[in-house]
Image (cartoon, rainbow, N blue to C red):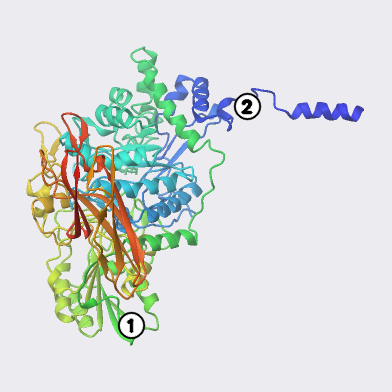
Amino acid sequence: MKKYILSAIAACAIIPVMGAIPVYLDDSRPIEERVEDALGRMTTEEKVAMLHAQSKFSSAGVPRLGIPEFWTTDGPHGIRPEVMWDEWEQAKWTNDSCTAFPALTCLAATWNPDMSLLYGKSIGEEARYRKKDILLGPGVNIYRTPLNGRNFEYMGEDPYLAGEMVVPYIKGVQDNGVAVCLKHFALNNNEVNRHTTNVVVDNRTLYEIYLPAFKKAVQEGKAWTIMGSYNLYKDQHACHNQYLLNDILKGEWGFDGAVVSDWGGTHDTDQAIHNGLDMEFGSWTNGLSNGASNAYDNYYLANPYLDKIRKGEVGTEELDDKVHRILRLAFRTTMDRNRPFGSFNSPEHLEAARKIGEEGIVLLKNDRSLLPLDLSTPKKVAVIGENAVKMMTVGGGSSSLKVRHEVSPLEGLKRRLQGIADVSYARGYVGDPTGEYNGVTTGQDLRDDRSPEALMAEAVDLARNSDYVIFVGGLNKAAGQDCEDSDRSGLGLPYGQDALIEALAKANPNLVVVNVSGNAVAMPWVGEVPAIVQAWFLGSEAGNAIASVLTGDVNPSGKLPMTFPVRLKDVGAHALGAYPGVKRVDSPIVDLEYKEGILVGYRWADTKKVKPLFPFGHGLSFTEFTYGNPVADKSVMTDSDTISISLDVSNTGRTAGAETIQLYISDPKSSVIRPDKELKGFQKVFLQPGESKTVRFSLNKDDLSYFDAERHEWVAEPGVFIAKIGASSGDIRKTIKFKLK
Ligand code: GLC
């Protein structure tokens, strides 16, 4: 009997006494209850401490309550190497070399949401493994000018494509218990004067072009944090902006996450308190020596805010809202005991990087079906150009990485052609022989003091004596190229590449130009070059992805996420002189008016009938596809209807391949100006030779609408609409008319 009594007492002892686990620590309770409970336990000082950085990339938790710190990391393409507590310089860790995934322009060029989910999952696992809670990316700023230094970090010129492609990336990352930090919100569409540009844009353009990708990322992607941008809008810095953050993001869109400043994007305590900023990072202090002993206490949302509260100059309502959001972020990340553990530099991540690269590479031109390389008999292959050897994962600004490895195009081709072809290399030109960013060096010695003439002569001679010539050039991550905090000065290729390409074309008709860039470039030699490939910045597996496509191991299926104009003047912003803006008198502010309005990218080219070099959505294949006649399930639709349009697409060639069928909407008769066409649907289908598949699109009133700024709502005008279905914005294969009642 005694034994039973003892066991009964023992049993009671292990039943937790109700209330012994505080609600905020009880995983079984809803997040909102846990937030309220934690908030109620915090002092004002602890709340203010959560609002700002404590080091270059981290912010405080609540040590007394066991709520962890937040660790953030760049960037959109891979996990940045560790830096010193309060420096941009390297911490010189030896365990933080990562996998570099392709740049987001390449991801967008896959037009494949599955690739986006794979990307987000993979980079999210790397961030999680590196114990980072907030990934400072992805970016979805719209490609307004081909000069913007950071276009390579974004997803092109069309808000629908960017929105569709960013949502799965966000899900993939956040499924790891890591928050994305969607950036840069908003209107950060060039780098020159990025801290002082005040963007002037009409509301219709703002809502139709520059906001939709962010809105979809917030409302469908459920982004947990978003980063304010450096520029101003309506004379307020975007990091504390009543219109963008309070009215639109938190008001109209119902964003329940935290707004993070860009590093150094905070400029005023009152505005930071009242205009929607929640977490302040990177304010211009060096953290430990400049000013007070710990300059982080001098942040705008640090002691200056605390002082205002203590003096009764401001209440704590805004403070509690900010901390509520930050605690919600904590329970989604650092306080989530069930989040996965991630992984780092796994074979799966390298495979993902290669697959995304292979699917994003765009075959722009392929006369005489020069590609894929015919390797049925031994061949001599000349590889020429600096970008065949130059590492592209170091540099470019905050997205710069320290990688476990990076396969260059030359290495990739040598590996793939080993024993099959004789591969030789010539530099051709010298562009940027340096290779260092924030203390990370490529370790390459690309110095070459031969004259341009000598370099060209060597390349032309090699080309003349080869069966194939593969020129790998383009841009790079140096300032003034594809790089943060600077824009390009022109559309053309740098370093005399045009002359070299023309010389190579004369030396050997079997010339393939592989352009490595995150931006469109001018191609004055386009008529002399039979095969052109847009290869983006592809990360760790660059050379393998390029070799797969050039040899036909992979049939290219990428499509351009931005227009390649013939010349700069063919771009709305430049045709109207609406870049880089006009500096105010006696003020550092530069006013930049988006005079082209909604006519960005193909919206300008197609409406103004300016033929591009290569249109938005363009991309060839090694096989052919035919489009059947589209059929609609109704010819008249109402406001509350959806219309479904379907068509059969067939692979009529000899190799398997994938085609992205694009559906654009056109409103031929409208009371307001509307673009010639607007992308409202796309489907990527993989087809075996001879195979057909039915592709379906469904459209509703919203898809037909324009934004009426006066009424502040989306309006679809009754009348005839045309669905334009094609392989690109410049290659409409089929159309079908229908009416909106
Ligand atoms: C940079 C960039 C931003 C980056 C941040 C931290 O200036 O604008 O994209 O995440 O600062 O490096």
Read off the residue under disc 2. 21
Q: Where's residue 587, x and y in %?
A: 13, 32
Write down the quadrant of residue 360 in the picture: bottom left
Q: Residue at x 21, y 43 (%)?
A: 704
Name the outermost residue toward the top. Answer: 312
Q: Where's residue 167, x and y in %?
A: 36, 46
- Is ligand 1 closer than 8 angstroms to the Cβ of mark 2? no
Name the outermost residue toward the bottom. Answer: 377
Q: Do we see residue 198 in this rendering? A: no
- Secondary structure beneath disc 1? loop
Q: Residue at x 49, y 48 (%)?
A: 130
Q: Tell me the quadrant of ligand 1.
A: top left
Q: CA distance from mark 1 to mark 2?
A: 69 Å
**13 with respect to 389 (left or right):** right
Kind of residue at badge 2: Ile
Q: Do we see residue 468 in this rendering? A: yes
Q: Residue at x 28, y 29 (%)?
A: 240
Counting residues from the start of the chain, the first of labels 1 and 2 encountered is 2
Write down the quadrant of residue 536 in the picture: bottom left
**68 with respect to 83 (left or right):** right
Q: Is residue 428 above or below residue 248?
A: below
Pointer 2 local density, CA inside 10 Å: few below 14, some 14–19, many at least 20: few
Q: How many marks?
A: 2
Q: Is residue 613 above or below residue 203?
A: below
Q: Where's residue 368, x and y in %?
A: 20, 78
Q: Name the disc covering residue 375, or none.
A: 1
- Secondary structure beneath disc 2? loop
Q: Residue at x 10, y 31 (%)?
A: 586
Proximity of marks 1 and 2: CB atoms separated by less than 8 Å: no
Q: Where's residue 319, x and y in %?
A: 39, 22
Placement of the N terminus among the 4 image quadrants: top right
